[in-house]
Image (cartoon, grey):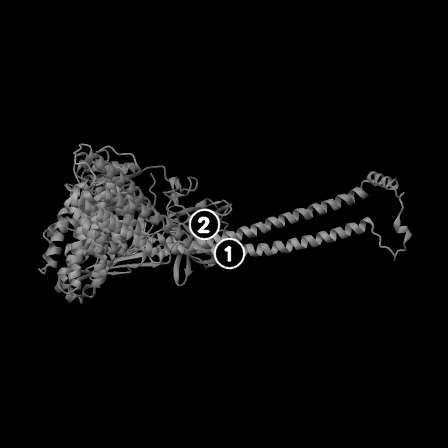
Amino acid sequence: MPHRELLESFIEEAAEVLSGLEHGVAGLRLLSRPSPEASPTPSTHAPSTHISTTAERLNDLSILAHRLRGSAALYGYVQLSTLASLQERLLGTRPQLSGEQHQEFLSLLEQVNGTLRQGLSRLQAGGNDHDLGLLFARSGGATTLQRLLQQRPDAFQMRASRLHHATPPGEDDPEQAAGLSGAELTVDRQVQVFARENAEVWEYFAPEVHEHLASLREQLGRGEDADLQVMFRAAHTIKGSAYMVGLPPLGDFAHSLEDLLGAAREGAVGLSSDVRHLLAEATDTIGDLLTVGGGAPGTALPAQLASVAARLRLAHSGGPAPAPLAAPNRSATAQDMVGQASGNQATGNQASGNQPQAAATSIRVPAARLEGLMEQLGELVTARARMTRLLSRLDELQGSMTASQERFQRTVRDFEERYLNPDMVRTEGAALSSSPMGGLDFSQQFAELEFDTYNDLNILSRSITELSADFAEVRRRLSDTATELSEENEQLGKLVRRLRLDVNQTSRVAFSQATARLRRWVREQQAELTLQVEGEDVQIESGILQRISDPLLHLLTNAAHHGLSGESEDGRRAAGKPPQGTVWIRAAEQGNFLEVTVADDGQGLDYARIRERALERGLRSAQELDALSQEQLGRLALLPGFSTAREVGHVAGRGVGLDVVATAVRQLGGELLISSERGVGTAFTLRLPTTQRIMDVLHIDLGGGHRAALPVGSIRSLRDVPVSELRRDAGGSWLDFGGESVPVVDARPLWGQTPDPANPEARLVVASSISTLIAVRVHDFGEIEEVAVTAPGGLLAPLDHLAGMAVSGTGQVLAILDPAGVLRLSRRPEAWLGQTHAPAQASAKRRLLLVDDSLSVRRLVGRMLERGGYQVVTASDGQEALDLLQQDADFGAVVTDLEMPRVNGYELLAAVRARPETAGLPLLVMTTRAGEKHQRLAFQLGADDYFTKPVNEALLLRRLSTLRRSQPEVSA
């Protein structure tokens, strides 16, 4: 609530404006009455003059309503501002009505003014404006407005106000240019035009309706235990607010929903599963209407609105709640939701520019939270005043120090002039002797004990003593002020920290905003599954929630069509599972990370099928696939275009879903974790770092004057460990920390610094990354500082080991390191080592023997190998290859097909392994045969790896490089 003085000022101003509105409407009432003294002589100009006068007065009153709307919104009175906005719109249309309709219009204006007057009276008495919409509806205003809109919809079209420049017809609105009235526009166009022309109203109206929809969904989720009173109140508020802002389609639909809920509340209609399903569909329809208002296409909205409204009226009349009239369309809609999500990820949400700016950037913040922020801001102002007072005391102390310094300088200067400048001393003595007293020395007339005498040394000593006392006093006051200043600075730091945390909370929304869409998908798909959601009250950054909504829908789709669809009810019972599958969605905040898990109790990942598809697509060779763990095999499903579905359908088989999920998580700087057990189920966990614009960081010294920082929230421990206690193997150095082996990454070489090998101790920062712990070795630890972090941009954006950039208190630019990114960078030395450090590469090209009976394959694969730096010799079949090997066995490897004339690939493998001079030669099979039987026989005959056509160039070159390193060099 505003300060009392501000509230009084607002009420005084609002009362003045409202009085103007009331007098204006009364004047319109008088103007509409026929004058008894009017001349009976007809006049052709009288009607037009009367209309012109009425229009001018309506326009003037519209300006007053606009002032009241803006003032109420500024002071946080949403309902009062909404009602004033309705008055502004009614007056701004300047409807040309006559007879009873004109009188009814004036009565409507008086009803709005009366409700506004009641609201001001409540505020003046210390109340609030929360139920003004309900008061307006009870006064009959909503009914009057609805009746007028139905009778004369063409009369209530917004006209250009004299406050603004008139827009030429058709310049902004194609419907207006074509001469279409509001009654002729379809519902979707009416909503979009309303949202565009009333962006300020839409900015607070749409979030308010979304809140009531969330309340409806929450109650519907309780089944038969739903609170009908809460649901009725939500529908009633939506109806009243829609009529107030001038959106009749939504008001009419919400009215039908309210009627059904009222009948259910009174017991006239039972809250059966069919009725609950209808109520849920009506709630989703209102959400669709708001989405269309935000700029989304809505060609199906008019039919959907009419169909659901008709079913609501039928259910209210006591008839059975009919099934949806177009069930196939609902499935198509759900498929479109998945497809649109994929498209948005693929195109980078290019269509977002068509939506109103307010809808993309506004967040609804509870008034209590804003009130708390204002209180903290008041404390901040008070703290600043105390700091200003202390700084004024420092200025006073500076003045005292300056005065003491001047006294000290004057004393020293006098002493120097008296003893270090004899001429000046003689001159002063002569002046004294020529004085009127004749140079009489009074001290000679008294004994030593009768009169104290002071020489210059005594005077200097006394002056220095006084100055010392002055300096001691200044030092004491300075110490006290510094202590108070330090305490105030500490309190200010705590206040700023608390304010920062609360401000961060204002950008967070409940996770339930994302789950409503998922519940609707399950309902519209009529999927045989149970959706259970945990953590709907978890507060998540609105930007993060928007970007994970589509990935969550893809994961739900994947669980339904891959995890659960392959199981029958009998099979689930045999496995000890309930007949109907279950999908769990859990959200939780763990430290600086947000974890969202989508799990199902289905059949789990089919690792054999994943291996088969990866081999068929040439993503990995058979040898590499055999070496992969189940977790690594599961991550192959995240690759673009990868799908284990045997048939491509509308929802599954396109290889888009998990790729979209992985891409979104990667863009957010997180990681997608996969856990699956065959026959038990699968869990996908999105682990995302929470957005922090201000954070505490630990400075780390990397040597050579280079400094960086690590987020304090990710640091688990700081340790000085003897180098001898670190465990080393082929994979690097490891630290035993809490019973876990933690990889050690030396960050100094990454910055071009050479570590000192003689240092017996390693300074380690044990930090937690998204999926593991990492020990970062540094030169030294620094201080902890609170900094403002910005995302790296420009040339620094591609560096994934940077979590952000900051400027320290000393003005030094700090790189905020991501521990996981540092670990990834350390494993790619080619990304940071210079040419002088890179291992020397052999300049001579290695010779390869390529064997295939297809000329086009030999040419295509031969060029791949040549681009990889190899010298390629080709053979058209196994016999020709054996002849070449007989003449010269100096080849680095043999790449061969299986099905060839004369000597096939299997026979070639056996012959090469049988000859001593070629027994150790690496052999790679490249064929169209991906069956397990073909692979097994090839490996039994001595093949080192197995590829399927078409072969992936990068994969082929990588495997050749690995096999070459494992073989001794062959001299030319």
User: Callout 2: 10 Å neighbours few (<14), some, many (20+)?
Assistant: some
Which mark, residue 951? none
Indicate the amino acid at tag 1: Glu
**Nearer to us in this view, 707 or 284:** 284
Q: Nearer the viewer, residue 451 or 719?
A: 451
Q: Nearer the viewer, residue 496 or 686?
A: 496
Position of residue 30 measured from the top left corner of the image (x, y, whole percent) = 24, 44
From the top left corner, tell me how far across and down residue 525 is, in percent.
15, 54
Q: Nearer the viewer, residue 588 or 570?
A: 588
Q: Which residue is mark 2?
A: 787
Does residue 278 lie above or below 839 as drawn? below
Relative to 441, 25 lies left or right: left
The kind of residue on which mark 2 rests is: Val
Around disc 1, counting alpha carbons within 10 Å, would you say few (fewer than 14), some (14 to 19), or many (20 or more)? Answer: few
Is 527 above or below relative to 161?
Answer: below
Q: Is residue 382 left or right of residue 321?
A: right
Percent of width and height locating residue 324: 11, 54
Q: Secondary structure at mark 1?
A: helix
The reply to whether residue 669 is visible in this rendering is yes
Mark 2: which secondary structure?
strand
- Between the C-alphas of marks 1 and 2, the distance is 16 Å
Contact? badges 1 and 2 (CB < 8 Å): no
Rendered-image quadrant of the C terminus: top left
Q: Could you tell me if residue 681 is visible in this image? A: no
Q: Which residue is mark 1?
A: 490
Dividing the image into 4 quarters, which one contains the N terminus? Answer: bottom left
Count the marks: how many? 2
The picture places residue 732, in percent across and down from the top left corner, at: 40, 53
